[in-house]
Structure formats: structure tokens, C-alpha cells
Image: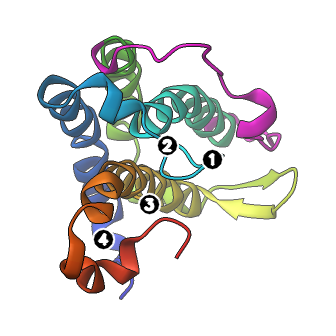
Amino acid sequence: MSIPEAHVLNWVQSVLQTTAARFQHLGEALPVDLLAAQPLPGEWSALECMQHLLDIERVFQSRLRAFLAGQDFPAYDPDKQGTKFASPPQMGDLVAAFIPLRAESLSLIAGLSAADLTRRARHAELGPVTLSHLLHEWAGHDLMHTVQAERALMQPFIQGCGPWLKFFTDHVAGG
């Protein structure tokens, strides 16, 4: 299923409006040890997913502004350019930093029209892309890391569920 062009702006905004509240609720409801637990070495915890979303929010904003200015933009490598932390931050602190950035992003998107969706720019690695592509990727990226965070949170429960493990085979880290 693809999104009808008439719905792209609305659907993207709808998805992007949910992210902060979802992570805020996780931060308020769950212990920091669970939020910081990596499913496997090198895989991101829920906290690391939120940190990445915070880092990349600035990147998406700069890309959107580049489209509007008719400029090309560089690639982003989260492993080299993303924030790393020595000890787990509080989810609430990450979400508090994310909320105003996301509000700014939503304001930028609210100023777009359907005609803007065909604007073109060049991504340093991917080549020509449209603003519609960027907006689809932005919403999909948010959802992907929300699922990734929740999958990380599932792991200790999956590992302890005994004979029910067979019902989680699609969700076991490394599986």
C-alpha cells in the first residue's frame, strides 16, 4: 500500500505528532535499567533509539530547509555523527529536548503544500530525491525506531516466557 499523494502531508504529520508522547510514556512507566537494556551487544536500547531520534531531528530539519532553498544535502552516518553517552540519560531529559525540535519540524511541515512534494534535491549518497521521499522516510524512520525501541524492551520478557517463546520467534533479538 502506498499513501495517496493527497494524504502525504496529513499522514506524515499525524505520525510525527505521536513520537514524543510514545517515548515520554515509556520513560515515565518503565525503569531506566529496562530502557537502557540492549537486546544484543551493538543493538540499540530504547534510550539509544530516542537519542538517535533527537540527533536526527536536526538532520531532517536541515534537509527540509535545503529542499525549500533548492539546495542539495550531505548524508548522515549515525555511527560517526550521532551522540554517544557514557551512562544512560533519563528518557524524560531526551524527550524534553526532543519536544521543541519536533514542534519546530511540525511547524515547517505545516507550511508545505502538495505542490512542494515534487521539489527535488540531491542526497550525497542516494542521488536525486523528492521532498515527498524525504517526508515518507521521516515518518517511516520514526516508526522504525519506535518499533526497534519496543523490540528492545520485549527481550527480557521473551527470554523469560518459557514454553511461550515459540510465539515470539519473529521478535527474538538476533533471530
Residue at which label 4 appears: 6
Q: Could you tell whether 124 is left or right of 69 in the image?
A: right
Tell me which amino acid carries mark 3: Gly
- Indicate which label's residue lies in the foreground, 3 or 4: 3
Residue at which label 3 appears: 140
Tell me which amino acid carries mark 1: Pro
Q: Secondary structure at mark 4?
A: helix
Q: How many angstroms separate mark 1 from mark 3 (CA)?
A: 25 Å
Does residue 157 show up magenta in the picture? no
Tell me which amino acid carries mark 2: Gln
Residue at which label 2 appears: 38
Between disc 3 and disc 4, whose residue precedes?
4
Q: How many angstroms separate mark 3 from mark 4 (CA)?
A: 18 Å
Q: Which residue is farthest front?
A: 162
The quarter holding residue 23 reads top left
Q: Residue at x 58, y 49 (%)?
A: 43
Q: Residue at x 51, y 31 (%)?
A: 57
Residues packed near mark 3 inside 10 Å, few (<14), some (14 to 19) or many (20 plus): some
Circle count: 4
Residue at which label 1 appears: 41
Q: How many angstroms separate mark 3 from mark 2 (CA)?
A: 22 Å
